[in-house]
Image (tube, rainbow, N blue to C red):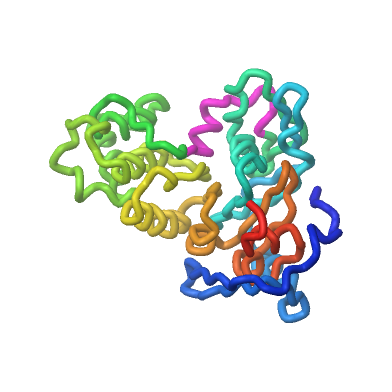
Amino acid sequence: MNTANNTPFHAQDTQVNPESYTSRHGTEYHSTGSVHIGQFDPYESHKKKAAQEVKITTENVHVYYGQTEAIKGIDLNIYQNEVIAFIGSSGCGKSTFLRTLNRMNDTIDGCRVTGKVTLDQQDIYDSSLDVVLLRAQVGMVFQKPNPFPKSIFDNVAYGPKLHGLARDKYDMEEIVENSLRKAGLWDEVKDRLTHSGTDLSGGQQQRLCIARTIAVSPEVILMDEPCSALDPIATAKIEELISELSDQYTIAIVTHSMQQAARVSDRTAYFHLGNLIEVNSTEKVFTQPDHQLTEAYITGRFG
């Protein structure tokens, strides 16, 4: 893994206001501004994941926008059915890295990716790979809800129609209903499926976009700050949904909110200036980070 060296970011602060976070497992974390590595088994998270299947692997991944290197040689394993959060300051590369996982960077002029990214050991940058099918396997939920200017039903049915996943209208109705149920939206929209998806509230639109992603039976869901445009109530619903969906899908989420990362994720990866500084169990990252840069970000000394 390409990580920054362990030279101190700056002199250790002695007065840092502690912050607390509550995890998706109900554990309350307290960040004290000091690191006590000896109190925590640094291999615990790796042992926990050892029996799990690796879903996505990146090896020495670099991303360039023209001559500018945005991602600097990242190695990372993402495990089956885990929720992994990518955190870091604006411009650190976390969203750019997320987009490498389903080749969304291909749509950006002048963007170039080197290294290797595999999904179930298949190289997703192989020239023979069907990118449309890849993006069905690795779906994306964007920062701003983007429902199509179609009915709620047609929004969810779009992908299954494109990929020929339904044999008849009854199959399609079942796919739409199941997807909306998984997205926690069915009870709210079941009597207005013919209404436009753009008529829904912001939080409902985001859940509609999640239902649209689920409808093509993905294996991985990528979320790029999915709650940044939502109010706290809608955010809570999306976070609860993420926890439920992780039973069936592997989820990678970019977030600017450390509290959100603590609430929803199993592991957290901290990015800084295009480098992956640290990836560990969320509890460890927030209580006993291995790296000074991680500690400085978590305790609010920069970022």
Q: Residue furthest left?
A: 191
Query: Is 235 inside the magenta-drawn segment?
Result: no
Camera-side residue: 125 or 289?
A: 289
Give the residue displayed 34% in from the left and 28% down from the top. Answer: 158
Give the residue displayed 52% in from the left and 26% down from the top. Answer: 132
Query: Is 132 inside the magenta-drawn segment?
Result: yes
Q: Mark yes or no: residue 101 visible.
A: yes
The image quarter containing residue 284 is: bottom right
Camera-side residue: 4 or 42?
A: 4
Q: Mark yes or no: residue 182 visible.
A: no
Report x, y in % for residue 252.
Answer: 55, 49
Give the residue displayed 33% in from the left and 27% down from the top. Answer: 148
Q: Residue furthest bottom?
A: 39
Report x, y in % for residue 273.
Answer: 72, 43
Report x, y in % for residue 225.
Answer: 49, 45
Task: Point out the stretch of residues depicted in magenta.
Answer: 124-140
Q: Residue furthest top?
A: 109
Report x, y in % for residue 256.
Answer: 54, 50
Is residue 114 shown left or right of residue 148? right
Camera-side residue: 259 or 19?
A: 19
| In the image, residue 100 above or below residue 94 | above
Is residue 177 shown left or right of residue 66? left
